[in-house]
Image (cartoon, grey):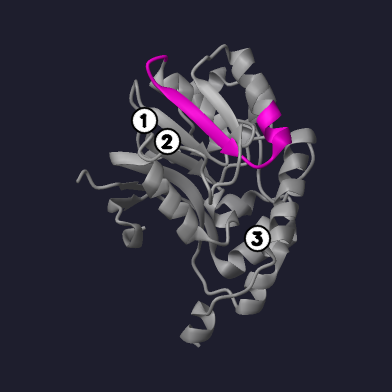
Amino acid sequence: MERHGFERIETGLLVDTYARSKFEDTRRKAQKFGARGTTLKAFKPLG
Amino acid sequence: MADALEQEVEIDVVLLKSEIQKTYSAVSEEPDRDFMFPTGRGWAEDLEYPPELSKVPDSAVESFAGVANPFSLGRLAAGERVLDLGCGAGTDSLVAAQMVGPSGGVVGIDMTPAMLAKARRAAGELGVTNADFVEGEVETLPFPDESFDVVISNGVIDLVPDKDAVYSEISRVLAPGGRVQIADVTIQNPVSAEGRRNIDLWTG
């Protein structure tokens, strides 16, 4: 995002989204790769 | 090793888009099915969505497939012009439409017609007139420069191979001082080139 000029980049907490999957294989792969939900806020400069 | 992990990997983009459309059409048309990711109102409530969620019709929220809560980073203000990238059945758009009120507006864009049909129906059920839904792709947004104050999105940019194109388009359509406020998937551990070619890992 910095490459595209965004500033004041803020990230939120990680969420264990795929721990809620009904599929064991998905839960296993998510754990292996550390796949989590997260949030991000960033601003486009004024000038 | 690092070079190998950072190398460009060729993805069959046409196949990927087709698989994504198949998956999310199913989320739209058969919301009670089990998917690889959590869905529905219970999931949105667990993510502590804002109170506006309670008014969003079940017809939209049953197909909610977000990965986190973009509103956890702050509420939208009355009067803001909002773009929802990959709006799906419209849950986030319709939460946003209530926040910005009649002096603001929301445009949701999605490439899955079945999802857009649900979003439009749900907006009618909710009775909001400040939400529009447009078919299109997030790498080539059909909107003028600097036409939005906020860009929201939930679990969409991770599905797009050309993330630079998406961020470039977001920057183009945002007004100066505007913000992006998104939820997405982050990967904490390296994924091999072979893994990144695996379409199932993208759509799951």
- Outermost residue, bottom direction? B1
Q: Secondary structure at mark 1?
A: loop
Foreground pick, B182 / B35: B182
Query: What residue lies at 37% left-to-right and 48% top-to-bottom?
Result: B171
Which quadrant would residue B60 be assigned to in this image? top right
Residue at left offset 72%, top offset 47%: B21
N-terminal label among 3 and 1: 1
**Residue B106 sits inside the magenta stretch:** yes
Q: Specify few, some or many for label 1: CA neighbours under 10 Å numbering under 14, 14-19, or 20 or more.
A: few
Q: Amino acid at mark 3?
A: Trp
Residue depicted at 60% across the width and 65% down the height: A31
Which disc, if any, is residue B71?
Answer: 2
Which amino acid type corresponds to the residue marked 1 in the rendered image?
A: Arg
* Amino acid type, callout 2: Phe
Residue for point 37% across, 16% down: B103
Dot 3 and dot 2 residues touching (CB under 8 Å) = no
Q: What chain does mark 3 sit on?
A: B
Relative side of B88 to A39, left or right: right
Seen from the viewer's position, the closer of residues A27 and B145 is: B145
Q: Nearer the viewer, mark 3 or mark 2?
A: 3
User: Magenta includes B143?
Assistant: no
Q: Is residue B54 positioned above or below B183 on the image?
A: above
Element on which disc 3 rests:
helix
Q: Which residue is mark 1?
A: B75
Residue for badge 3: B202
